[in-house]
Amino acid sequence: MQHIDISTGERRGNTLSEKNLNAVLEAFRTDGYVCLPDVIDTDHIDALNEKMQADIRTVEKERGISDNYQGVRPPPFHPYLYKDILFNPFAISVSHALFGDGCKLTTYGANTAFAGSKPQRVHADATQLWADLKQAPPCHALVVNIALVDVDEKNGATIAWPGTHLDTRLHTGDRFPTDEMCASWPRGSERVCTRRGDLVLRDLRVWHGGMPNTTPVHRPMLAL
């Protein structure tokens, strides 16, 4: 996964330089996802993580955790609604560059790799809009992922197949590539590792899957 080196000046101004915006868009076009490191206040990350970890413990105690990677949403109330998460200026500028005016935030949820989680079936969150395409059209929807803890292979870093948003075989609702499709993808797969404060943007057509969390600590990850 490409990490774009954002300058201190860009962070202070909440604006990507033309060079970096073009680099983000190029990574998005070729790989289907990209990381913007250290663009969210880690104090906000830590406060939200503390709240969500407490909520997970409550849910686990009251009714157990049965839904792998889903089931516990971020709190939709003060003081946990942070502007640099819900209205991140870098995510907004990339979205506008991809879609133009009229793009909107439609969901605010989470994908949590619970301690002891199992592998998730490889899937795409969205498919090509039409069948029999000779070439994939531009991105029509994306997700912003923000992990609330440092993420590595031990605690469930997502597996992804770079460039699969350009594959036209999944369409009109068929979201699941076969094992053969995954094994034969020429670019292979990689794990999406991030640190607190990082933001990942991903084309919804990219093939990916949740991976086991082998640590005793739950791994919440926001999905917008």
Image (cartoon, rainbow, N blue to C red):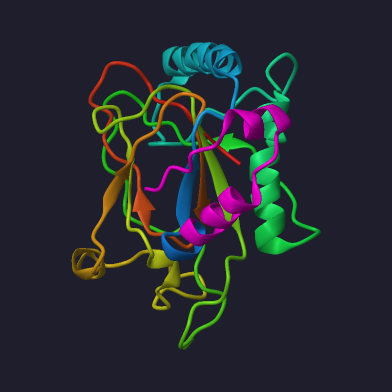
Q: Nearer the viewer, residue 30 or 212?
A: 30
Q: Residue furthest right?
A: 102
Q: Position of residue 171 (x, y in %)?
A: 47, 75
Vertical placement of 129 versus 122: above or below? below
Q: In the visual, does 188 lie left or right of 132?
A: left
Segment colored magenta: 1-27
* Left or right position of 135 against 144: left
Residue at 52% across, 11% down: 50
Give residue 129's position: percent from left, percent from top: 57, 75
Within the magenta stretch, is there residue 5? yes
Q: As rendered, which of 133 and 113 lies closer to the eye?
A: 133
Nearer to me, 175 or 12: 12
Horizontal and vertical percent position of residue 174: 43, 70
Please state the horizontal and vertical placement of residue 131, each as a whole percent of the image.
50, 84
Write down the quadrant of residue 42 in the picture: top right
Quarter-of-image position of residue 84: top right
Does the segment drawn in magenta span residue 99?
no
Q: Residue visible at 22% across and 64% down?
A: 179
Query: Is residue 107 visible from the viewing direction of this image?
Result: no
Quadrant of the rendering where the C terminus is positioned: top right
| 164 relative position to 74: left or right | left
Q: Residue at x 46, y 53 (%)?
A: 33
Q: Is residue 128 visible?
A: yes
